[in-house]
Amino acid sequence: MIILEILRLAFASLRANILRSILTIFGMAIGIFSIIAVMTFISGAQAQLESGLSRLGANSFQIQKFPGINFSNPWLRYGNRRDITLPVAERFRELMGDSARVNLQIRRGNAIASYQDRKTTPNTRLIGTDENFLSSANFEIASGRNLGVEDVTIGRPVCVMCDERA
């Protein structure tokens, strides 16, 4: 009998304070929705990060003059660092031996590539690289062939085209 009395008093209190009850329920709903939204955002960001890292491989790292992510002008902070020259990179490749695939790159962004009367958009990124680029970046060739050791050694004018949106 006491449980029925408690329930009757609770519903009477809810009816007496209807606005307070609605605002409390509304506040709880917003709080739960916010927690779900934040958790969804975090899991999506984590999946994106894991996807990017898995593309590089477990035993991969990069050495470069400028950081990969920078929110200001990199020349102000990192411009005085020494350039990584080809002899230094070749020495690193020699020290790593056959246990690692060392990939050398020179990158130029916002370039225009042209052939005869055809041109690309001005935001094309050009990468001068060697035969280990595809394996170190975990890319696959859709058609054609990769750069070969002879292409790099004799400086043959060949290219591999990539659509990063794919």
Image (cartoon, helix red, strand yellow):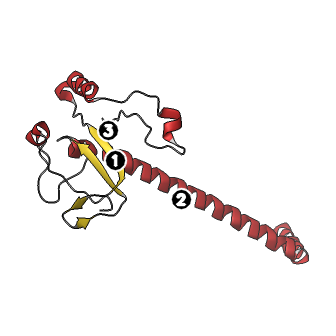
The 10 Å Cα crowd at callout 2, few under 14, some 14 to 19, many 20 or more, is few
Corner quadrant of residue 66: top left
**Callout 3: helix, strand or loop?**
loop
Q: Percent position (x, y) of residue 136? A: 25, 41
Q: Is residue 18 above or below residue 64?
A: below
Residue that badge 1 annotates = 108
Q: Percent position (x, y) of residue 41? A: 54, 57
Q: Along the line of sight, which residue is nearer the eye, 122 or 40?
A: 122
Residue that badge 2 annotates = 40
Is residue 153 visible in the rendered image? The answer is: yes
Side of 69 relative to 138 (left or right): right
Corner quadrant of residue 25: bottom right
Q: Amino acid at mark 3?
A: Ala
Which residue appears at 59% of the width and 61% of the height?
37
Which residue appears at 44% of the width and 28% of the height?
81
Q: Along the line of sight, which residue is nearer the eye, 45 or 163?
A: 163
